[in-house]
Image (spheres, rainbow, N blue to C red):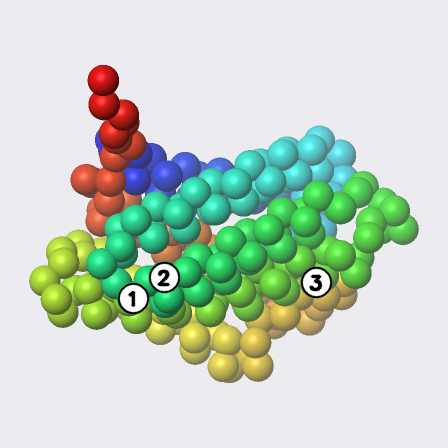
Amino acid sequence: MSFGQFTALISFILSMGTIAVTYWVGTSAGTAELCNPFIDGCTDITHTGMKGDGGFIFRGGMITACAFFIVWWIVMGVWLSRSSRVAVVVMQFFGVLAALGLLAGTAVLLPEKTDTHWDIHVRGANLFFQGMLIALSINYVLIIRAYKRGMPVPSLHFKSLIMLILWLMFLAFAGVTVGVDMSHGKRIIEWWATLFIGLYFLTSYWDWKKIRLVNQQQY
């Protein structure tokens, strides 16, 4: 497994795995409502990872995942090094900004609502979704252009499907916005949007077989 593949895989496992484990722990402990949140929207991601052991798992796992999101964007910039330098920098700026927003929004979550800095959490979470959509959109356009120049992109069709779904959800619900109390519909969108963003990260596993760490120091 190359370094690029590891980055894509660990970004998906840490983010989606943390949410899954947190939800299982929360429902087992009775701190989260048991349902199919992708269909019922009975709870949002935030409130599944606030109380009890699930809260520690959620904060630790998601903050670590955010660090790997940043690495993912750095690797993506290397992979697209032949693309417009300005476009790559803008893409990475929004991608890293989104990851930092999620990191900040997650770090302030505490077991009790009254102790949580909700203004920071809400702004951080919204920065993640909106910033990530901008970054992924730029990324997708750059990948399409690179593909037309002859660069192999094994996951192109899967990436295309994910971007189509993300934009349809964004337009249908006037943007994926996160708040303290959300409607069932927006909760459902939050779960699906998070999953598809994670899957987009994962698709690079098939593209980055040759992305490796190289020691260029000469003796």
Residue positioned most to the front: 219
Residue at the spot 37% in from the left edge and 39% down from the top edge: 7
What residue is pinned by disc 2?
A: 88
Q: Position of residue 27 (x, y in %)?
A: 66, 41
* Residue under pointer 3: 123
Circle 3: is it few (<14), some (14-19), or many (20+) Cα within 10 Å?
some
Do residues under tags 1 and 2 come within 8 Å of each other at their CB atoms?
yes
Q: CA distance from mark 1 to mark 3?
A: 30 Å
Residue under numbered circle 1 = 84
SS class of the residue under badge 1? loop
The x, y position of residue 72, in whole percent, is 40, 46
Secondary element at image label 2: helix
Q: CA distance from mark 2 to mark 3?
A: 25 Å
**Residue at image point 46% right, 69% down:** 134
Q: Is residue 202 visible?
A: no
Q: Earlier in the sequence, mark 1 or mark 3?
A: 1
Is 147 drawn above or below residue 17 in the view shown? below
Identify residue type, mark 2. Val
Q: Residues within 10 Å of mark 1 (few under 14, many from 20)?
A: few
Label 3 is placed on what type of residue? Answer: Arg
In the displayed image of the protein, which residue is found farthest to the right? 114
| Mark toward the start of the polypeptide (2 vs 3) | 2
- Residue drawn at 10 percent across, 62 percent down: 150
Residue type pointed to by label 1: Ser
Q: Position of residue 4 (x, y in %)?
A: 30, 40
Q: Quadrant of residue 147?
A: bottom left
Badge 2 density bin: few <14, some 14–19, many ≥20, Cα 10 Å: many
Residue 36 on image: x %, y %: 56, 55
- Screen quadrant of the C terminus: top left
Residue 4 visible in the picture: yes
In front here: 131 or 22?
131
Residue 52 location, quadrant: top right
